[in-house]
Amino acid sequence: MRDLRNIIENAIIEYNKYYSPEVETKLISISDKFFEIEFTGSFCYTCGFHDYFDDYKILLEEKGLKANVSEILEIDEGAFVTFEALKIE
């Protein structure tokens, strides 16, 4: 679980480096297989709201974690996105 947390947190740092202040991410919860990330900000809706979640998923893959989006709960300023951790390489 430690490797999983490290990958997720490193991806959050890198993601926020490139997307903030337009979008910021924060780890909300983590378990053995699932983790929830909060995405907040002004977003560029013409770019595709869900593209932001896919970009985070790609960052995870670059860091060695294959994951899928399993649930998206949209809120006024963003979304809570639950990912399923599939495999750490």
Image (cartoon, helix red, strand yellow):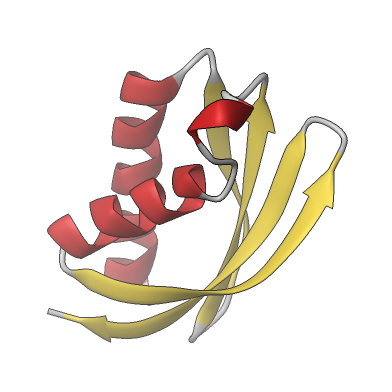
Q: Position of residue 43 (x, y in %)?
A: 60, 25
Q: Is residue 52 left or right of residue 14?
A: right
For this orientation, the residue located farthest to the front is 46
Vertical position of residue 43 compared to residue 32: above or below:
above
Q: Is residue 25 left or right of residue 7?
A: right
**Residue depicted at 41% across the width and 27% down the height:** 16
Q: Quadrant of residue 45?
A: top right
**Residue beneath the point at 36% across and 59% down:** 57
Up the image or down, 80 lies above or below 66; here it is above
Q: Position of residue 19 (x, y in %)?
A: 41, 23
Residue 50: percent from left, percent from top = 55, 50
Q: Nearer the viewer, residue 23 or 89?
A: 23
Residue 49 image offset from top left, x and y in percent: 59, 41
Residue 64 showing in the rendered view: yes
Residue that appears at 39% across and 62% down: 5
Say above or below: 78 vs 43.
below
Viewer-proximal residue, 14 or 9?
A: 14
Question: Residue at 12% of width from left, 79% of height from top?
Answer: 89
Which quadrant of the figure contains the N terminus?
A: bottom left
